[in-house]
Amino acid sequence: MTVTFIAEVSSNHNQNLGRCYRFIETAAQIGCAAVKFQLFRIDKLFAPSVLQLSAEHRKRKQWELPTEFLPLLHEKCAEHDIAFSCTPFYLEAVNELAPFVSFYKIASYELLWKDLLIACAKTGKPVVLSTGMATMEEIDEAVTTLQAADCRDLTLLHCVSAYPTPVDQCNLAVIETLRQHFGCRVGWSDHSVSPAVMYRAVHRWKASMIEFHLDIDGQGAEYPWAIAGFRKKPQR
């Protein structure tokens, strides 16, 4: 069984292109098939009243990935023979990413956003969908929406939306439940900060994809939830 490993950069790039390159280089060195970033704008994520009242939310402006980085990241990934992916958090981001990404990753938080699902599917690119916090009925509706919009390459990721996720709450058996119900590739989006959990997802539950947060130095905006010093992915 071939397992696809995706290194999640999240917002740990610090808006620094050289740092982005280090993530790509590290992900390639440890054998990942893809590296993933996030594309969002705080004015599209939060209401104006929230941004006005909350300095903490305004600080997240520093977490935004500059769109001018996209072609450069695409080129760097090609140089290192690793796929470039990104999660769109606003509708226009789908088209902004289209010339550059190999596949779209849709976050658990966006699973119910039909317009985003449809926009990603209609590009013809593969879609990876995280399922944290969702009921089976909600996942079913999302899958139906994607397939109706001609998504022909779909991977579902079992995910527990807790940061970090306690090992005893990972419930990896859901991987098999999703596989049996939907008949597609199913993997694990890891927030446990435990390589042992990823190992079990692959070897016990036959996850076909593993997404994990990569940390290169403990300096990023979200590094407490990344795998500090992670340099070797689990063996297939």
Image (cartoon, rainbow, N blue to C red):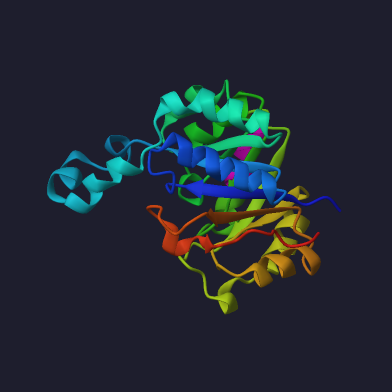
Residue 182 seen in this snapshot: no
Could you say which quadrant of the image residue 179 lies in? Answer: bottom right
In the rendered image, residue 235 lying in the magenta stretch gets the answer: no
The spot of residue 2 in percent (x, y) is 83, 50
In the image, is 57 to the left or to the right of 91?
A: left
Residue 142 within the segment the image draws in magenta: yes
Kindly tell me whether residue 232 is visible in this rendering.
yes
Q: Residue 35, image x and y in percent?
A: 60, 42
User: How many numbered circles does the render carry?
Assistant: 0
* Res. 67 image quadrant: top left
The boundaries of the magenta stretch are 141-148
| Residue at (51, 47) in percent of width and height | 9
Residue 122 lies in quadrant: top right
In this rendering, the answer to whether 152 lies above or below 23 is above
Q: Quadrant of the C terminus?
A: bottom right
Q: Residue furthest left?
A: 53
- Could you tell whether 135 is left or right of 32 in the image? left
- Up-down: is 14 above or below 193? above
Provide residue 109's location: percent of width, then percent of height. Answer: 45, 49
Question: Looking at the image, which is closer to me, 113 or 72?
Answer: 72
Q: Is residue 190 left or right of residue 45?
A: right
- Give x and y (percent) for residue 143: 63, 43
Of residues 219 and 145, the one nearer the viewer is 219
Residue 94 or residue 115, whichever sits in front? 94
Instruction: From the viewer's side, name the closer residue of 210 and 159.
Output: 210
Residue at 58%, 25% in the rendered image: 100
For the stretch drawn in magenta, the main secondary structure is helix
- Considering every residue shown, the one lying at the far right of the view is 1
